[in-house]
Image: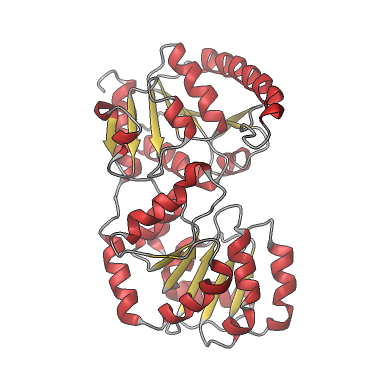
Amino acid sequence: MKYLISGGGTGGHIFPAVSIANALRQLDKDADILFIGALGRMEMERVPEAGYRIIGLPVRGFNRAQPWKNISVLIDLMRAMRQAKRIIRDFRPDVAVGVGGYASGAAMKVAARMGIPVLLQEQNGFAGVTNKLLKNDARKICVAYEGMERFFPKDKIILTGNPVRQNLTEGSAERAVEFFNREFGVSFRADIPTLLIIGGSLGARTINRSIIAALPELAASGIQVIWQTGKGYIDECRQAMVPYADSSIVCTAFLGNMPDAYAIADLVISRAGASSISEICLLGKAAILVPSPNVAEDHQTHNAMALVRKDAAVLVTDADAPKQLVGTALQLIRDTERLEVLSRNVRTLAQTDSAQRIAQEVISLATNLG
């Protein structure tokens, strides 16, 4: 069988896509998988690193603030759709999977026109623009939240949860201590409260600036901090860290060792992207969520509120973060009873084996059983 997977732009689209591909290979040892992404976006690096072929399309998002600039975007979109048609004609996939993002719209629309069964995977509690536009082209739509019939035909919806990176559950706090002490020259211990700060694959300006402003407080707090800044903010954050070089704060652009970082963390500060929330749920981690205000339809707030309403996370708005984030984190990380309640409640929201369940739906479409 041949499987076409398209989407990307952020880790929130790429990690689920790669997880689905890995699950397809587990279920179908001879699977032939091809990715379509957007030129210049991070999937063009991350997908080959995961061992898969990818072809990039010259596609960009629409400029909502300055609509008159979208003429070139439309021209690129037409070029991308022509290129997608050639790719699909040459590859001849049995099924096409769209996970959202710029490239997914072009690739899935063309696949549907060519009679290829299309399955969509929607990560968020508020459906993305691309998937909403494709709802009539899809045969099946795999979602992570209940109530998605607001956006999609009810008879197409399958509640599967979001796929996460497969090795996340294999982390070890003891191994984390060894890793961070060796790689960053700190003196971590497994029995000291540890705060993990992650701003998504691209980083988060508000979270980073809030941490910079509170570095004196964090350095004197007696807790351990693992701070992933994103590559766009690492220089600014490292400069701010100079006076605190001997503290128990690790500052790094990217965390390649996420399973161990999660394992040692007592509390996580994170944006409210769908993939991050799915990881937090799966691992049962107490979390403070800071939804990004710079996303379509404010979907990260919808994601976060799905947890907050279940008393499974704490929300600090982006606007309140500079004054409230670190103080809230330091108060919460010392409240072991509250941490336990959040951890217990968030674990009940986890959807396990999501990638395998989605892969099974993909295979059923490919074999004309779905």
Indicate the colouring scheme: secondary structure
Q: Residue at x 33, y 44 (%)?
A: 144
Residue 250 at x, y percent in the picture: 60, 74
Residue positioned 68% across, 82% down in the render: 244
Find residue 264 and report its image quarter.
Answer: bottom left
Q: Is residue 69 left or right of residue 247?
A: right
Q: From the viewer's perspective, is residue 217 above or below residue 299?
A: below
Residue nearest the observer in this picture, 182 or 86: 86
Which residue sits at x=47%, y=72%? 175
Image label count: 0
Q: Position of residue 78 (x, y in %)?
A: 63, 17
Q: Position of residue 274 (x, y in %)?
A: 43, 49
Does residue 184 lie above or below 57 as drawn?
Answer: below
The image shows residue 242 at horizontal and vertical percentages of 74, 78
The quadrant holding residue 266 is bottom left
Q: Is residue 36 visible?
A: no
Whether 107 is drawn above or below 248: the answer is above
- The image quadrant where one finds the C terminus is top left
* Quarter of the view holding residue 186: bottom right
Asked if residue 101 lies left or right of residue 360, the reply is right
Quadrant containing the N terminus is: top left
Is residue 107 among the parts visible in the rendering?
yes
In this orientation, which residue lies closer to the viewer: 143 or 224?
143
Which residue is more in the foreground, 205 or 24?
205
